Image (cartoon, helix red, strand yellow):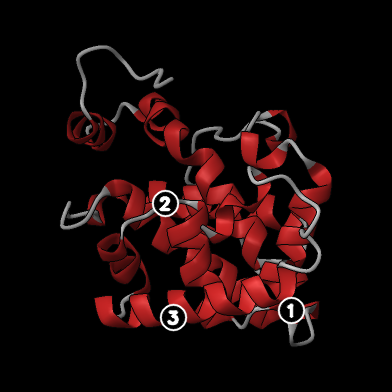
Amino acid sequence: MDARSPGLDEAEMIAAILAGDSDLYHQLIQPYELSVYRMALSLVKNETEAEDVAQEAFLKAFRNLANFRAESKFSTWLISIALNEARRRLRRQSTVRMESLDEPPEEGGKVSPALLRDWREIPSEALERKEVRNLLQEAIRHLSPMYREVLVMRDIEDLSTEETAGALAISISSVKVRLHRARIMLQKELAPKLKLASPKKRRWFS
């Protein structure tokens, strides 16, 4: 359920936050916490890294909230920030990471609101069955990033084709082509492993 302040829609909450009511920020992002985390988890290597990606994405969104122009949904804007953060961390993983110890804190000590609970305490049907989840995550990680990102947004997070295109800054036709190819590749890898699964578990490929 959406536990937002009664009577305030998303635009009004954003305006109130920009006017100084930073306590509303957690209520603003609460409906999207799990989606951002699950997307991050599908892109990076482990839960701790995904938590870091999500946390940093929410902090960056808070710091840059004044730049949100409502040309897309707030959730799409948030996803694109998380996506860029995940990409940045994946690139950094391929290089020596010693310099991270010397990075100065951002924003000159500006105070940001406390944001996230322990992700492991958030219930979700998508995370209940560990065995199937692990098979799926492993198969998704084997996809190249261009296919993985589209698949996660469309088939896991249920973003529309238009929202996915906006978040990735690609055309709608590119989203459709990449999604089709990603589904074929994923089905080829997963189908033999899920042969004995119930029809409910195989609904991914319907």
Amino acid found under the numbered disc labelled 1: Gln
Q: Position of residue 32 (x, y in %)?
A: 45, 40
Write down the residue under mark 2. 158
Give the SS element for disc 3.
helix
Mark 2 or 1: in front is 2
Give the vertical position of 151 relative to 5 (above or below): below
The crowding category of the residue bearing disc 3, from other C-alpha atoms within 10 Å (few below 14, some 14 to 19, many at least 20), is: some
Give the vertical position of 105 relative to 36 (above or below): below
Marks 3 and 2 sit apart, C-alpha to C-alpha, by 15 Å
Q: Position of residue 112 (x, y in %)?
A: 49, 40
Residue 149 lies left or right of residue 37; in this view the side is left
Write down the residue under mark 1. 93
Asked if the residue under mark 1 is in contact with the one under mark 3, i.e. CB atoms within 8 Å, the reply is no
Amino acid found under the numbered disc labelled 3: Arg
Which residue is at 68% across, 80% downward?
A: 92
From this viewpoint, is residue 84 visible? no
**Residue 113 or residue 122, whichever sits in front:** 122
Give the vertical position of 43 relative to 117 (above or below): below
Marks 3 and 1 sit apart, C-alpha to C-alpha, by 25 Å
Write down the residue under mark 3. 178
Q: Position of residue 133 (x, y in %)?
A: 74, 50
The crowding category of the residue bearing disc 2, from other C-alpha atoms within 10 Å (few below 14, some 14 to 19, many at least 20), is: few
Amino acid found under the numbered disc labelled 2: Asp
